[in-house]
């Protein structure tokens, strides 16, 4: 064995000696534009867009990657059928790529196993930019851009070789909403008569009501949510001035989780943990919450609207077990489950304060959309597909079939869904902080989870070992989290 | 009399231990099995260990609702991969172990040390490389690619079987050699029958590995129709936990069946008569 | 007392090992030098004894064999040489150059420009080197065979016929023939990826370098410098390493003896229906490991069934124990140990059952005649026998446990413990490696760390294995 070791070593050394590191990566600016310059139709004569010029390819098959919900609820079939009918004369056929919804284009694409068009979340698609796995899009050729809000478009903008391109067409926005049971709201709970029960108008009221519920019956809880989850818990920090990365999420050197009065948000997380008990610490509540809400063991929770179905299914099962017919149960479940705007936060950052001054709550969100793989042989047809799939009709159909909130303003205006309107207006008002489109975003989760777990565990510790008591403690926790993120970004890069 | 009491106590203790062992191993499985028969459909809505009511619904969905999650197809793929790998691996492993245990040749000791050291490399680092290798051989989305990897890397684990062959007395072989049997015949007529328990062990383990492996098929099988059960189960949505449990329980069935088919051969092996002489 | 003496013995033997390193190194190089000298002498002999017919083989493999009447063999050699030359001309040359340059032309997927894929070039380059080595061996054997044909003829005998050659494959050459397929498989799917990983440790692959858009470069020892340069990495490494060693020893010990104990228990004469009793561990064995881990994680979670009973159906939530939480280092380690035991004991039991069934019954018969007690029989016959037969397993189990990725990845992922750099206090080196490299695609760094882990583990296990009875005295039971 020694001998073969020496062979490997010799080979490695030989290889090292023969070619030292070559320096200087080619990062020239195509088209001679200045760094970060925006692309418009006027300066669009860059070679990158050449592939979208020319005739529509004929007699081809496009592989489309969609998410599992779109498939299981039948939307993808509708979309493909409509598209194939429209383009039948060109012989273009779009089919389901039939691969995992989280497939990594960077891994599959270069070797010819990736889809032509893919539908994924903005942070996922933007990870493909650096390796040029997704095409920069000629936005002026896509009709949807006339109706999309700036904030949604920006989620897919990235600088590569000094130019700020768009890499994906936003389709729907994801942001947390409050889900609660109507029948657990006591009579006359709407003191100000605005149609919203008092206990879901502010976190202070919800906090108080949660304590009441638990005091009356220890096996029941008011508001419940797994607090470790960075996606849902970061909203508390953002509401008091924190952010992920500086310069609108483009500067990873400036990590903002500890900025502004973020400590107030951290204190709110800990205060919520007090009312929730030890079960909020790990992720089990994420999967049990549907059943618990259905059985009335908890009053409210926070999650994204795409899982609404899970709540109603569980509630229907409960009602049927109680002796209702299937259709009665369906109506009753729809009636009883309320999806509402997030409660407002106290300006003071103290949930136990009576009659506080209130501020809007910010939340972390994401935008799903279509992108075109650089490895496609049919870019023009792909563009046609993206144009078709992001049209008014298709987005409208998507909203009604899947219950997701569209990004297109005209679809939202035409919609009678309160959720769509709510998310759209929050997006426009800047109440939704989008996950930054940088690879460094991948480093925020573990340190974030650790801090959230620490905050959530704290109330269960014996009084002498509790870590978080005053402002400085919270600030120290946040600083440590930021330090860990910074370390993770810089140490190995 | 005293000896008899002692014996009874011994038997009692033995059975108590056996019951404890059975309980420890059965309980988590039983929980999974019960959960898969839960009628509420959601594993996570069960209060405590026992569901409130039972039904076959999860299993029915598992095999009939195949539009998104084609469990029967995945099961078939897994079966093909596991059976082929099992056959090839067992042959290669037994052969390797036998040769290294029985023959003296120049490369023998270096090979043994080499295999030991190679087995120590953290394997998932090489997964990326395996993926690229398979793209070059055009074996992505191909069940045969997986079979090749499982079978070809199996001889690395020959040590257990070699240890076993080392305990077979040489006298038996010498007798056969005197009768003029060549190596192939000695292997077929003497070694194989003697090594039955070891072969069964090898077959069982080399069936189980591909059967329950997740990482390799996940990397090499892109198309959903080519997936194995493990990959498919992991792709199940958040709300499909009863189906997950049902799929997990059902995948255990062939291995248990295989065990009961093979158990006879595991304990009969060398009889004391064969060794004497 | 016994164990203390054993411990001292191990310490002494390790000390001896290190003391002997200089002498060993010297003798190693002396041995290599002798080999080189004898190889040189072999070449000289060859030219001294060869005639023009044999020398023809230097250019055309097998020409010598054909000249001496071994047509089939000669043509086979010749065909293989032609195949090799065609391969090198068409692909091999390019790959070989690529192994050193790692590509010169960048790709641009945006404009559809397909350039060099560094990683593919590297891999195929290694494959080419492997093929060249195989060819050289073939080349040497063709020369040797041509010469031996001549020498046989000089002695006045007939060179061996093809049929005789084939017959020798099941005789003298049997080991090599039998091992050909396994060796080839292991080479392609095990050795080549490992060689490649070792090379990757010296490149900047991963992170900013995204294949195939960017080209990868060799960077020498930069990755190792990065690892050792970061101050916080060192302390984390030693903390994790300590726990990792303890974990590997503990879990191997527990698994081994519980598995063995279970097999012995089931083999007792008084146990009726052992197939039935054995079915329970088999059931555990039959459910894929990752599913079991997910199930256990849920079982120990705060909303899981165990806490359901602890908290009396959530009437007393203050009784809930966060088994796998941030503060629960020892709970989590204990649960990890338990779960891992649950997963691996069935395998050990199966193995031990197979081995016990083969134990030579006459050993016991003799002991019975001598009047040895059952306990004495166990310690004098059974245990040494089983340990002898399973030492290799023990080593591979140790390594398996040392590099046990799944247990803590599934049970307790996503936590950074105080004083650790991107790891929790239950993480093993392999989990840490994953956090540092794979989850961020830093392949170069990852390969460098795995190379370090590899060096540590292989040193430990080679040391143990080479000194074990089943390696040194293979014929104890023959």
Image (cartoon, coloured by chain):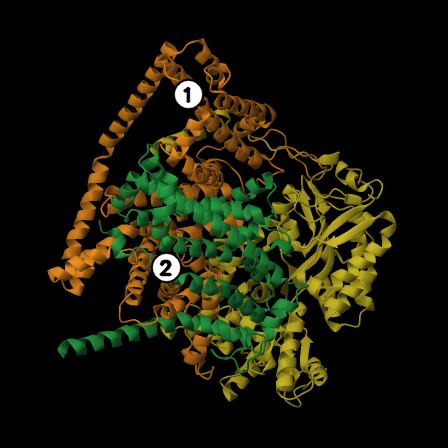
Chain colours: A yellow, B green, C orange
Q: What is the secondary structure assignment of the residue under circle 1? A: helix
The answer to which of A478 and B197 lies nearer the viewer is: B197
Q: Position of residue A252 (x, y in %)?
A: 57, 49
In depth, the one of C228 and B240 nearer the eye is B240
Identified at 50% across, 84% down, the residue is A219
Alpha carbon separation for disc pair 2 and 1: 46 Å
Q: Give above or below for A367 relative to A307.
A: above
User: Which type of secondary structure does the marked residue at label 2 adopt?
Assistant: helix
Placement of A175 over or under B83, stated as above or below: below
Q: Position of residue B64 (x, y in %)?
A: 65, 68
Determine which residue is flagged by label 1: C145
Q: Position of residue C377 (x, y in %)?
A: 18, 60
**Closer to us: C403 or C425:** C403
Depth check, front residue: A340 or B33: B33
Seen as rendered, the residue at the extreme front is B179
Chain of the residue on which disc 2 is drawn:
B
Q: Which residue, given by chain and number where applicable, does mark 2 sit on?
A: B266
Write the residue at 79% across / 62% down. Answer: A78
**Could you classify mark 1 by the number of other residues whose Cα lies within 10 Å: few (under 14), some (14-19), or many (20 or more)?**
many
Is residue A252 visible in the rendered structure shown here? Answer: no
B151 left or right, relative to A423: left
Quadrant (top left/top right/bottom left/bottom right) for the N terminus of chain C? bottom left
């Amino acid at each position: 064995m020694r001998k073969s070791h020496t062979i490997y070593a010799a080979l490695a050394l030989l290889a090292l000696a023969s070619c030292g590191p070559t320096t200087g990566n080619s990062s020239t600016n195509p088209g001679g534009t200045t760094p970060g310059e925006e692309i418009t139709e006027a300066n669009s004569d860059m070679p990158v867009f050449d592939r979208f010029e020319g005739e529509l390819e004929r007699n081809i098959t496009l592989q489309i990657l969609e998410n599992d919900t779109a498939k299981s609820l039948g939307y993808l079939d509708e979309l493909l059928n409509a598209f194939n009918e429209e383009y039948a004369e060109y012989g273009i056929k779009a089919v389901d790529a039939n691969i995992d919804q989280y497939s990594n284009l960077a891994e599959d694409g270069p070797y010819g196993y990736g889809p032509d068009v893919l539908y994924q979340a903005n942070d996922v698609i933007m990870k493909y930019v650096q390796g040029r796995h997704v095409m920069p899009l000629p936005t002026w050729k896509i009709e949807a851009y006339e109706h999309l809000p700036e904030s949604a478009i920006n989620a897919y903008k990235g600088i590569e070789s000094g130019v700020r391109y768009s890499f994906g067409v936003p389709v729907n926005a994801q942001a947390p909403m409050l889900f609660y049971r109507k029948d657990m709201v006591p009579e006359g709970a709407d003191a100000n008569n605005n149609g919203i029960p008092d206990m879901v108008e502010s976190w202070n009221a919800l906090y108080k009501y949660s304590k009441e519920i638990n005091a009356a019956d220890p096996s029941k809880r008011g508001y419940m949510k797994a607090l470790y989850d960075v996606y849902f818990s970061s909203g508390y920090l953002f509401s008091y001035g924190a952010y992920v990365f500086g310069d609108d999420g483009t500067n990873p050197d400036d990590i903002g989780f500890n900025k502004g009065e973020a400590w107030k948000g951290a204190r709110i997380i800990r205060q919520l943990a007090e009312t929730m008990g030890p079960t909020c610490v790990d992720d089990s509540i994420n999967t049990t919450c549907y059943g618990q809400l259905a059985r009335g063991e908890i009053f409210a929770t926070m999650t994204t609207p795409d899982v609404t179905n899970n709540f109603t299914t569980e509630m229907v099962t409960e009602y049927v077990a109680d002796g209702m017919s299937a259709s009665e149960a369906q109506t009753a479940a729809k009636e009883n489950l309320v999806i509402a705007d997030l409660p407002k936060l106290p300006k003071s950052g103290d949930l136990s304060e009576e009659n506080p001054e209130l501020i809007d709550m910010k939340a972390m969100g994401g935008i799903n959309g279509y992108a075109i793989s650089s490895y496609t042989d049919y870019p023009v047809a792909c563009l046609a597909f993206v144009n078709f799939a992001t049209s008014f009709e298709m987005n409208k159909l998507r909203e009604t079939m899947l219950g997701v909130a569209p990004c297109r303003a005209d679809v939202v205006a035409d919609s009678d869904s309160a959720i769509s309107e709510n998310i759209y207006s929050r997006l426009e008002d800047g109440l939704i902080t989008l996950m930054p489109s940088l690879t460094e975003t991948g480093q925020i989760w573990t340190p974030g989870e650790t801090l959230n777990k620490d905050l959530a565990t704290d109330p269960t510790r014996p009084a002498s070992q509790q870590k978080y008591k005053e402002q400085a403690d919270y600030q120290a926790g946040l600083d440590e989290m930021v330090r860990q993120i910074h370390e993770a970004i810089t140490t190995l890069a | 009399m005293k000896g008899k009491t002692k014996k009874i106590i011994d038997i009692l203790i033995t059975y108590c231990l056996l019951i404890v062992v059975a309980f420890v191993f059965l309980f988590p499985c039983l929980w999974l099995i019960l959960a898969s028969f839960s009628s509420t459909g959601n594993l996570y809505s069960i209060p405590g260990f026992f569901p409130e009511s039972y039904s076959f619904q999860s299993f029915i969905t598992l095999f009939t609702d195949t539009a998104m999650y084609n469990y029967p197809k995945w099961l078939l793929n897994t079966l093909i991969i596991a059976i082929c790998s099992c056959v090839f691996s067992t042959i290669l492993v037994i052969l390797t172990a036998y040769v290294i245990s029985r023959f003296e040749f120049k490369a023998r000791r270096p090979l043994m040390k080499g295999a030991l050291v190679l087995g120590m490399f953290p394997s998932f680092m090489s997964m990326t490389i395996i993926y690229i290798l398979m793209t070059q051989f055009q074996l992505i989305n191909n069940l045969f690619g997986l079979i090749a990897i499982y079978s070809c890397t199996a001889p690395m684990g020959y040590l257990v079987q070699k240890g076993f062959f080392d305990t077979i007395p040489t006298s038996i072989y010498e007798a056969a050699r005197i009768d003029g049997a060549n190596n192939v015949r000695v292997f077929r007529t003497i070694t194989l029958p003697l090594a039955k328990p070891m072969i069964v062990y090898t077959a069982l383990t080399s069936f189980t590995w591909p059967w329950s492996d997740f990482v390799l098929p996940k990397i090499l099988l892109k198309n959903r129709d080519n997936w194995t059960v493990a990959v498919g189960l992991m792709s199940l949505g958040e709300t499909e936990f009863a189906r997950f449990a049902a799929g997990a329980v059902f995948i255990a069935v062939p291995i248990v069946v295989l065990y009961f088919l093979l158990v006879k051969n595991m304990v009969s092996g060398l009889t004391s008569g064969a060794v004497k002489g | 007392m016994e164990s203390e003496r054993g411990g001292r013995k191990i310490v002494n033997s390790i000390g001896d090992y290190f003391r002997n390193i200089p002498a060993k190194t010297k003798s190693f190089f002396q041995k290599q030098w002798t080999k080189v000298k004898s190889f040189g002498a072999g070449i000289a002999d060859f030219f001294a004894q060869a005639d023009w017919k044999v020398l023809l083989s230097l250019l055309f493999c097998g020409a010598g064999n054909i000249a001496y009447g071994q047509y089939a063999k000669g043509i086979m050699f010749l065909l293989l040489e032609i195949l090799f030359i065609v391969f090198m001309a068409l692909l091999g040359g390019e790959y070989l150059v690529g192994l050193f340059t790692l590509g010169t032309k960048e790709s641009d997927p945006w404009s559809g420009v397909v350039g060099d894929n560094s990683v593919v070039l590297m891999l195929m380059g290694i494959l080419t080197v492997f093929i060249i080595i195989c060819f050289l061996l073939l080349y040497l054997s063709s020369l040797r065979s041509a010469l031996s044909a001549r020498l046989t003829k000089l002695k006045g005998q007939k060179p061996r016929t093809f049929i005789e050659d084939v017959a020798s494959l099941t005789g003298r050459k049997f080991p090599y023939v039998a091992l050909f397929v396994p060796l080839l498989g292991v080479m392609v799917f095990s050795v080549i990826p490992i060689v490649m990983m070792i090379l990757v440790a010296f490149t900047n692959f991963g992170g900013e370098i995204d294949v195939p858009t960017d080209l990868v470069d060799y960077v020498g020892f930069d990755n190792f410098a990065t690892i050792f340069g970061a101050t916080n990495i060192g302390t984390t490494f030693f903390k994790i390493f300590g726990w990792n060693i303890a974990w590997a020893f503990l879990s191997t010990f527990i698994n081994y003896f519980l598995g063995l104990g279970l097999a012995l228990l089931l083999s007792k004469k008084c146990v009726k229906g052992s197939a039935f009793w054995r079915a329970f561990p088999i059931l555990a064995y039959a459910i894929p490991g990752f599913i079991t881990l997910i199930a256990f994680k849920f079982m120990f979670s705060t909303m899981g069934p165990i806490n359901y009973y602890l908290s009396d159906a959530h009437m007393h939530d203050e009784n809930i124990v966060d088994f796998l939480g941030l503060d629960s280092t020892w709970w989590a380690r204990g649960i990890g140990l338990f779960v891992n035991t649950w997963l691996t004991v069935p395998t050990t039991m199966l193995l031990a059952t197979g081995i016990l069934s083969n134990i030579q019954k006459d050993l016991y018969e003799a002991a019975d005649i001598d009047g040895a007690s059952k306990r004495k029989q166990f310690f004098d016959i059974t245990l040494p026998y089983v340990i002898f037969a399973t030492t290799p397993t023990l080593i591979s189990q140790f390594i398996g446990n040392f590099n046990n990725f799944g247990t803590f990845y599934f049970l307790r992922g996503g936590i950074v413990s105080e004083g650790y750099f991107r790891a929790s206090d239950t993480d093993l080196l392999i989990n840490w490696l994953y956090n540092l490299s794979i989850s961020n695609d830093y392949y170069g760094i990852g390969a460098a760390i795995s190379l370090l882990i590899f060096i540590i583990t292989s040193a430990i296990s080679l040391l143990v294995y080479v000194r074990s009875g089943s390696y040194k005295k293979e014929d104890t039971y023959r």
